[in-house]
Amino acid sequence: MKSNSHISYLLTDYLSLSSYQEGEDVTLDDIERRLMIIAREHNYVIPHHYLRLVSESSFRGITKVSQVFTEGLIQLANDFLERRNNRIYVRIEKFNAWQEQIAYIPPMLLISAYIFKNVISSITDIVSDSFYNQYIAPNLGNTSLIPSYISQLEELKKENNGFNDLHIHLNGTMETDSVWLDILHYPERVIHNMEESAKGNKLAREQYEQFDNWTRPDKLKRLIMQAINLREFLFSKICKVVPVIESFTRQAESSLYISVLHYLSMYPDNKEVASSFHHYLLILGLVNQMLVQQPQCFGFEQFQHYTSNGLREYSEQEYEQRFLQLAGNQLDNIKIIEGRFSPKDKEYKNNYLIDKIRRGWLLLNNRQGCNKSDIRLIAHFIKRADKQKKDIRFKELRLKNRKICEALISLRNSGSKNGKAIVGIDAAASEFDTSPEVFAPVFKKLREKGFQHFTYHAGEDFYHLLGGLRAIYEAITFLDLQRGDRIGHATAAGVAPETWAHNVGCEVVVPIGAYMDDLLFVYYLISNNECKALDSLMPRLYMRITELSREIYPNDDFQVYDLIYAWKRRQEDILELADSDELNNIKALRRYHQKEYVEKYKKEIKVNIFEILDEKALREVQLAILKIMHHKEIAIETLPTSNIFIGYHNSFNTYHLVNWIRWEKEGKPIPPIVLGTDDAGIFATNIYNEYCHIYTLLVYEYDFCINEAFEIIRKINRDANYYIFNNDSLYAANK
């Protein structure tokens, strides 16, 4: 349990939301009982009597619904937040717990509650310009994602003029507190985007039904219209006491929260205002759960729900607001970001998109004054599920990639500012959909045509830990990654096998072909002297690979050597091999692509996770991959919050960065490590806060001394300067 208060779950109470929508009253007893039920769902191993005691503690002294906000919510805010002059910070020892908390309650509400309790001396302060300039703007002006105060980190930020975010997708950036206002202001457009997303999109429909039936587009529309009416009522009511002007701005929303808390503290028996505020916040909470990845929603497919629902689409039409958010309330968080975008198959389409991005960044620069930050763009191809019609895997995607590749080359050759702004190439999305081999031909061609920097999402999500390690290795070798290139995530190379095993259980279901490839990959590593410690496993590996091969290819007697040879040649342009008839000369590779064998390859089997390789052996494979990356000087892009919420972790205290740090201290070769945010809105973070997470993890979870922890942070920051994708013409492009 991250908090000792059930108020933590206040905005996730769907039963109370349904009661309000059905015109029923919600009593204090209802709220207390329902929050305890929610707490039990989140902490199912904790005895009921303990949850009952926590519930009693959470509601001690609370006798009215209004006091849930004026006492309970404020106490929760006080538990997490602190004040230094006019700045509000997260208590450093609770920063990692705060990250989970704001997945349930958007931070603007908690910060506003703290300001009400600890800052305001007179209610007239709320509407004054001086109050806004002194307290609202520094803490909520551009973003609600406030940091902890870490003096060493502040100094490092000043020394470097901000931090480099080397892995951030430009879509999925906007935070809940800003998107919520757009939803209220333009409900018809947002709902239209949701409805369009739901058409033929299984992932979107899954999310609409995942939390509650109210999240269906048609029912959510009803909720949003209700929220608009409730907001209007609250403004009209509190305006009689505090002259707050209603508008769809961050200032107005934070002022609303503060003013309602003031009103309820003056009139605690006003059930209408208390219930209306509760009802309004419950709708906000439901929307927040659709915008921010929830702690209980593990895995990349869950993440894809958040990218598919259409709720952010209107807010992310333009770029200025999201860049202001990333820069922070003082506009000094960022030195350089490598913004990732999905390239189009026509040059003019890419020009249009990059124009919008650069225009938004220019507006940020105009606000920053002298200390301007830079943006560099990375074009990421999209991994997509195969819709195989003939005997070539991913034929349609391969052809699409060719078109995108030609459009990027054309843009680069044009000599335009937009072409010069693209400094790297990537491929992103689900690893279950597409493997590195599909992108090998276009990566090769783009390198030949002058693109110098490449990265690739690998080892983030996997059926078996070996599959994640194989994906990293294939990305390195098939894509010919070179010194200074990078791998995004690489979770499989760091997560403790014991932690992974604890999360997935003793057995996993995996496609038989993928599992055979995993074992083939290990066999190849050992035979290639990359993993000598596992020599004794080769006979068992050989036998199991042969057994699996006969199930997939029953009419062929392939030797392990044949399978390895075919596996290594997957990186070639299969379309060209097929056109030249060379594919027919490599029987195992031809079988791999033939539709009837693809179906056999995809057949699911259940395997013991430690069938051949135990925890120790798996760790040896991890170290072998890290050694290869170290020797090639290929950096890892690690993304703390994203990796925790998507990956095979229980919380921040199992984050695999610590394993890499320990192994390096033991003398193991570990590649350079750089930091990124991934999807800043979906994970409710920014680059400054990701550094905060690392500091908090090292000092408060693992008891590193402060100086040692900060030296690690300094090294990560130095590597972020060394391994950024440079383009000398970028600066000219931004002028």
Image (cartoon, helix red, strand yellow):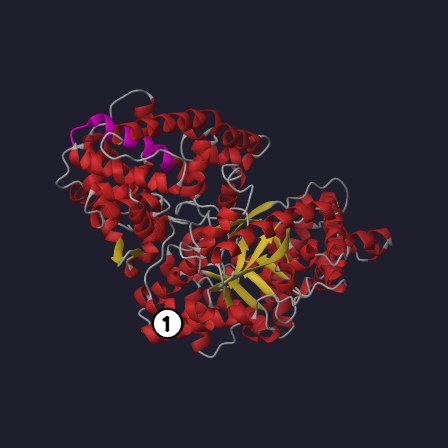
Q: Residue at x 57, y 55 (%)?
A: 339
In this view, 456 is above or below 223: below
User: Which residue was labeled with disc 1?
Assistant: 709
Callout 1: SS: helix
Q: Position of residue 456 (x, y in %)?
A: 61, 59
Task: Report whether residue 609 is seen.
Answer: yes
Q: Residue at x 40, y 58 (%)?
A: 689
Which portion, as a residue range, is magenta?
268-285
- Majority SS type along the magenta span: helix
Callout 1 amino acid? Ala
From the image, which quarter does the C terminus lie in?
bottom right
Let me know if residue 451 is in the magenta part. Answer: no
Q: Which residue, as the protein is rendered here, is positioned at the far bottom?
A: 667
Q: Position of residue 573 (x, y in %)?
A: 77, 56
Quarter of the image for residue 479 reads bottom right
Q: Residue at x 15, y 38 (%)?
A: 62
Q: Position of residue 100 (x, y in %)?
A: 35, 50
Q: Which of these two is toward me, 9 or 313?
A: 313
Circle 1 Cα neighbour tier, 10 Å, few/some/many (<14 / 14–19 / ≥20): some
**Horizontal arrangement in the rendering, residue 269 relative to residue 448 (left or right):** left
In this view, 675 is above or below 632: above
Let me know if residue 283 is in the magenta part. Answer: yes
